[in-house]
Image (cartoon, rainbow, N blue to C red):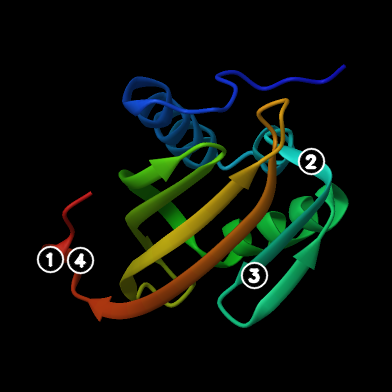
Amino acid sequence: MEQKFPLPPFNFETANLKVQLAEDAWNSQDPVRVSLAYTVDTEWRNRSEFINGRENVVQFLSGKWQRELDYKLKKELWAFTGNRIAVRFEYEYHDASGQWFRAYGNENWEFDENGLMKKRYASINDLAIQESERRL
């Protein structure tokens, strides 16, 4: 049986660890590695897109990191209970023209009993910035 530690129910330490592991995986920009933290039938809302299943997660992330260059992410635990975690995050990237952006957002995560994320709901806003304004 596939498991992704730590498992719910979460406490402060394990919720923080789950957030750090997610940050590390996303900063790897490896869509397959990231997808393995999710159930095979995971459900996402990412901005206005709805993504279902690991295969679609890999496709989505592959396209994302082809467009969002020099991507760097920072996640922060916001709240947790039982099998749910809420995070706030920001990330920076530039597009092919060299324009830098900082994206701000919140995510709500729900995990199954094996520690795999079955639901991810993300609200994200982008802000164009100058390269000199980068923080990450």
Q: Is residue 115 left or right of residue 32?
A: left
Q: Residue furthest left?
A: 132
Is the Cβ of the residue at disc 3 closer than 8 Å to that at disc 1?
A: no
Residue at the (41%, 24%) spot, across then down:
17
Q: Which residue is mark 3?
A: 45
Q: Which residue is mark 4?
A: 131
Residue flagged by tag 1: what amino acid is it? Glu
Location of residue 109 in the rendering, given as x and y in whole percent from the top left corner: 55, 50
Is the Cβ of the residue at disc 4 closer than 8 Å to that at disc 1?
A: yes
Residue at the (37%, 72%) spot, across then down:
98
Residue flagged by tag 3: what amino acid is it? Arg
From the image, state whether disc 3 or disc 4 is nearer to you. Answer: 3
> In the image, which disc is placed on residue 39?
2
Sequence-wise, the earlier of marks 1 and 2 is 2
Sequence-wise, the earlier of marks 4 and 2 is 2
Sequence-wise, the earlier of marks 2 and 3 is 2
Distance from label 4 to label 1 (Cα)? 5 Å
Residue flagged by tag 4: what amino acid is it? Glu
Relative vertical location of residue 18 with respect to residue 122 in this rendering, above or below: above
